[in-house]
């Protein structure tokens, strides 16, 4: 088992009626003038926006709003939020949305204290520039990234096409409201991309050497449950009990102080490659890019390292003969959810491979589990993913 640091300071209210705790939490944090960060329109349809506003009104507070955060959120939107927060003197940021909105909110919260926001994304320790951030509150409307309880935010610089991340204890949300009613009836595609992302997070976190036995046991159980939950929800989006189950699975996958990766060497090559791909084409959903790339990475890793412990366990749970069958089985599951499982479907062609390799190594040139990332490895993955 590897050494690790663990801290999971987010207060989570989970379940039906959780949003009734929002006003009390805002008051307890001493928030007087928040900036609310939102996506395009779904927060209005689900009631998450109205519930947030009524909590603020009950407390007699003023607030600002930043609308229009899109999937694969951009630096431009972050800078717009930083500008509003500075001008209005906001003392906090409330994210009403899923991963893209939360990541934008986190970056704004840190960004108001930074001269150059993008400098914090520098691959050589830029996150160390983050010395403080405004307190962040999350009203979650889409599960998948785990951003609602973790220390990471991913943003695309639309000028350069670089999709990079920051990681800092200062941007961990103080409070997260996990209210299932906001996710009832989510379009199947969003459920599927969130679920594929969460599965990838567990695999990335625990692909290395065998870690703490119970952690690996839980990780495989969480993947099994995500597969079950998403399989049901893409057909019956209103199944509340499975919706709740998937909400918590996503947090277990890559939140709560990164529980799924403690004591294990992580890989994160699939994310490096996927970020390169959706950096080039922001219309590709993160989870869908991973549905194509993650199984291909597993194939390449096993070719070089033999059957990996977590995949052996997963094979058992999925009823497969060996870990070698896991990549194909995952592609089949993702296809059953309506996701792409080949780079061809995403419009990624061989002439882009060199750029993808360059961007992937700029993002993560070495992985803890497997060391230096080599060109032939990335090309092999892209080859497997062009099915
Ligand atoms: Zn991800």
Image (spheres, rainbow, N blue to C red):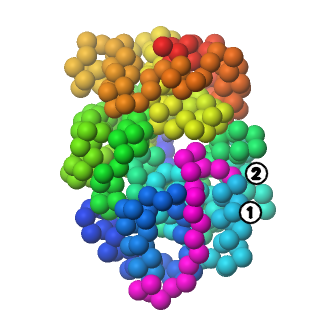
Does residue 286 lie above or below 148 as drawn? above
In the displayed structure, would residue 124 be above or below residue 277? below
Return the x and y of residue 161 as percentages of the image width and height: 70, 38
CA gap, disc 2 and disc 1: 9 Å
Mark 2, other Cα within 10 Å: few <14 / some 14–19 / many ≥20: some
Query: In the figure, is residue 297 to the left or right of 365?
Result: left
**Marks 2,1: beta carbons within 8 A:** yes
Front residue of this view, candidates 264 and 203: 203
Q: Which mark is residue 114?
A: 1
Residue 387 in percent (x, y) is at 48, 13
Q: Could you tell whether 381 is left or right of 162 in the image?
A: left
Q: Is residue 372 above or below residue 110?
A: above
Question: Residue 24 magenta-drawn?
Answer: no
User: Quadrant of the rendered structure where residue 310 is?
Assistant: top left
- Decide if residue 134 is on the left or right side of residue 214: right
**Res. 274 visible in picture:** yes
């Amino acid at each position: 088992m590897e050494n690790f640091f663990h801290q999971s300071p987010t207060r989570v209210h989970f379940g039906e009626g959780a949003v009734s705790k929002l006003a009390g939490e805002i008051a307890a944090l001493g928030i007087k003038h928040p900036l609310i960060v939102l996506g395009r329109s779904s927060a209005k349809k689900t009631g998450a926006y109205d519930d947030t506003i009524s909590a603020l009104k009950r407390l007699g507070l003023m607030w600002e709003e930043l609308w229009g955060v899109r999937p694969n959120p951009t630096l431009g939107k972050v800078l717009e939020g930083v500008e509003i927060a500075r001008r209005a003197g906001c003392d906090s940021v409330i994210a009403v949305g899923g991963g893209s909105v939360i990541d934008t909110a986190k970056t704004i919260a840190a960004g108001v204290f930074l001269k150059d926001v993008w400098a914090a994304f520098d691959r050589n320790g830029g996150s160390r520039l983050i010395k403080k951030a405004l307190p962040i509150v999350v009203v979650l409307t889409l599960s998948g990234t785990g951003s609602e309880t973790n220390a990471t935010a991913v943003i695309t610089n639309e000028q350069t096409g670089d999709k990079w991340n920051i990681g800092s204890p200062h941007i961990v949300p103080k409070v997260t409201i996990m209210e299932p009613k906001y996710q009832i009836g989510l379009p199947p595609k969003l459920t599927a991309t969130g679920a594929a992302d969460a599965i990838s997070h567990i695999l990335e976190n625990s692909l290395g050497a065998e870690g703490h036995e119970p952690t690996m046991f839980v990780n495989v159980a969480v993947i099994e449950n995500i597969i079950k939950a998403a399989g049901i929800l893409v057909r019956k989006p209103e199944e509340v009990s499975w919706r709740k189950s998937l909400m918590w699975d996503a947090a277990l996958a890559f939140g709560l102080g990164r529980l799924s990766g403690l004591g294990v060497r992580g890989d994160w090559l699939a994310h490096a490659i996927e970020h390169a791909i959706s950096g080039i084409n922001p219309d590709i959903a993160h989870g869908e890019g991973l549905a194509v790339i993650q199984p291909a990475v597993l194939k390449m890793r096993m070719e070089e390292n033999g059957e990996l412990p977590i995949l052996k366990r997963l094979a058992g749970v999925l009823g497969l003969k060996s870990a070698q069958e896991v990549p194909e089985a995952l592609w089949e599951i993702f296809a059953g959810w309506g996701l792409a499982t080949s780079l061809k479907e995403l419009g990624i062609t061989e002439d882009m491979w060199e750029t993808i390799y360059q961007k992937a190594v700029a993002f993560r040139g070495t992985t803890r589990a497997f060391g230096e990332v080599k060109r032939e490895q990335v090309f092999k993955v892209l080859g497997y993913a062009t099915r």
